[in-house]
Amino acid sequence: MKKITLTIIALSVSLAHADFEIKELSGKYIDVLDGGQVVARVMTAHDTTSAESRHETYKVYTHVFDEQGKAPITKGAGGQYTHHRGIFIGWSKTKFSGKQIDSWHMKGCDQIYKKIIDSTSTKDHATLTILIHWVTTDGVVFIEETRTQTFKRVEAKGAYLQMDFDTALMAASADVELNGDPEHAGCQFRPSDEVSKNKSAKYIFHKDGLDLKKDKDLPWAAESFKIGENMYFVQHMSHPTIPKGNTYSAYRDYGRFGAYFVKKIAKGDSLNLRYRYLVGNGKIPGRDYFASRYKAFTD
């Protein structure tokens, strides 16, 4: 009888830890699956046939799904601040060739997915590298982005997903200056629009007494928020190689948070950026836990 029981348990574990997969629905999105369940969805559609369709598809971003793979816990188009979408990146004051365009609100430009450069799936992680062109309305590619996202299963203190967001921004046609302000620039996370209604977002940092308007180069910030009856938490980590002056915006009750900096990129050069997101459900862990996760990232 013991042998039968042990066999059933082994089968259950093996099914829960089936391989990661990457599946593309051309012209729509790229799904990352773990054991057949969607853990993340990279939104790649770009449709300019109408003003409405362009608005729906003017930037590339990543949805994070709940632990059961049923629905995103992140926000898409529409709702409060429609340009906030999942995990996304942009600068409201992007300057090149004497022009200033807005790659945050997507005024005067689009982020256009071009192709998968590489993808790898194993038992415990998936890595996806894609090419994205940041293009002005008159067709000039001012940034050529190579975005690599690595998704890994995590099972500790409620965390269930780790996502590395490593990107190279190449100034394609002229010198580029990335500029803006803490609330309208950088790499950021926006939870479901439901959080803008229940105003449940709360934040924790690496130490007390911070003034986010003045204190810069924080290693990480984390938040908790509620969707339906479920609580979630997310940690946003900035690698030490991020340009100095990195400033966190992590205080809005609707949950949009992340960090930005100001940086110039010479024509033909690339700026390499590294971030990590840790996603979990249930009660938010304490500061020591997040500090240990950040140490693992930097080590």
Image: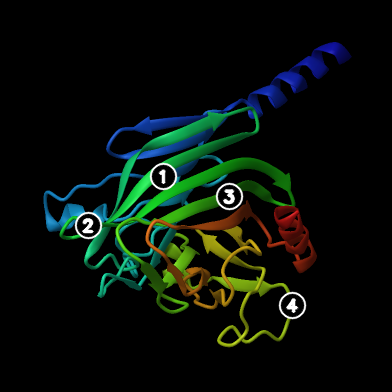
The first of marks 4 and 2 along the sequence is 2
Q: Which residue is mark 4?
A: 207
Q: Disc 4, disc 2: CB below 8 Å?
A: no
Q: Which residue is mark 1?
A: 42
- Label 3, secondary structure: give it: strand
The first of marks 1 and 4 along the sequence is 1
The first of marks 3 and 4 along the sequence is 3
Q: Is residue 29 visible?
A: yes
Position of residue 89 in the picture relative to residue 229 (left or right) = left
Residue found 68% across the figure and 44% down from its top: 154
Give x and y (percent) for residue 83.
33, 64
Q: Amino acid at mark 2?
A: Val
Q: How far, Cα to Cα, is label 1 from label 4?
A: 33 Å
Q: How far, Cα to Cα, is label 3 from label 1?
A: 13 Å
Mark 2 neighbour density, 10 Å: few (under 14) some (14–19) many (20 or more) = few
Q: Which residue is mark 3?
A: 164
Q: Which residue is mark 2?
A: 140
Q: Nearer the viewer, mark 2 or mark 1?
A: 2
Give x and y (percent) for residue 56.
25, 54
- Label 4, secondary structure: give it: loop
Q: How far, Cα to Cα, is label 4 from label 2?
A: 44 Å
